[in-house]
Amino acid sequence: MSHSTSPDVIRAIERVDPDLVAQAAAYPSSILADVAGRRGALSSRIAPLAPTMRLAGPALTVEVRPGDNLMIHAAMAIAKPGDVLVIDGKGDESSALMGEIMVSQCMAVGIAGVVIYGAVRDTEAIRELGFPMYAIGANPNGPTKLVPGRINWPVSLGGTAVQPGDLVVADADGVVVVEKDKVPAVLAEAGKKLDYEAKRLADIRGGGALRPAWLDGALRQAGVLAEGETL
């Protein structure tokens, strides 16, 4: 088998541990974004084709030129099962970069999902397949396959940086990316945050504390309430 020697195609990357991916998949994207410092969430323009779609996995990053999907085909050829293709399509919506045929290939390879800062097509078919696809829109125009790009280099999707191998988690709320070195600490905090929110919801629904305990203190610190004053 031949191997690419192009500096623009990096085949070997360090991926987030599969056990950590499995743990992260149990958390909502909102919980992970909160405990990651409210950073790493991608633009709300990047949305699932169906609200039931979910994905979690390490990022295999792809940079393409607007309207050209040559490097997506190359990335699919070297992807590992469980990878999430994270594609910087430059926010272009003039043509679709992926459709049913490519998604079917992704499924056969075992790719966990696609996050694309660009447009796709065959959206009804992709919904029926149930493959997790996050994009900024749909367009029936097909792409070209002519222009070089890069694989497994840092990319930016709507202003958020993604490194190869980073953790990607997505659900109905959108996509969040966690730097791979920070995943263990983020997951530890995610468990605490989820427990806190479950207790808070139980209190509210049970007619207990109907406002958060921190509210008065935060209002005093912001200068809305005087010291010793309460709502």
Image (tube, grey):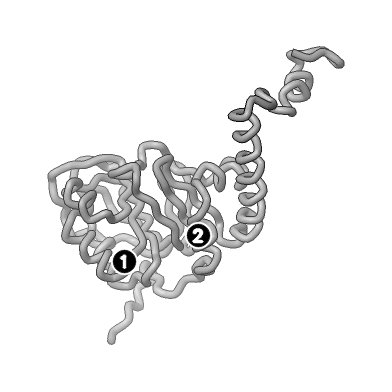
Please state, as top left, top right, bottom left or bottom right, where the N terminus lies in the image: bottom left
Write down the residue under mark 1: 75
- Residue 159 in percent (x, y) is at 45, 42
Question: How far is disc 1 from disc 2 in space, using C-alphas?
Answer: 16 Å
Image: 231 above or below 139: above
- Identity, as a three-letter code, of the amino acid under mark 2: Asp
Q: Residue at x 36, y 37 (%)?
A: 45
- Residue 38 is left or right of residue 61, and the answer is right
Q: Residue at x 60, y 47 (%)?
A: 36
Question: For residue 166, which numbered disc appears in the image?
Answer: 2
The single residue placed furthest to the right in the displayed view is: 228
Residue density around tag 1, few if under 14, some if 14–19, many if 20 or more, within 10 Å: many
Q: Which amino acid, mark 1?
A: Ala
- Residue 67 shows in this picture: no
Instruction: Give x and y (percent) for residue 84.
Output: 38, 60
Q: Quadrant of residue 149?
A: bottom left
Q: Secondary structure at mark 2?
A: loop
Q: Nearer the viewer, residue 32 or 194?
A: 194
Q: Quadrant of the C terminus?
A: top right
Q: Can residue 145 be seen here?
A: yes
Q: Which mark is residue 59?
A: none
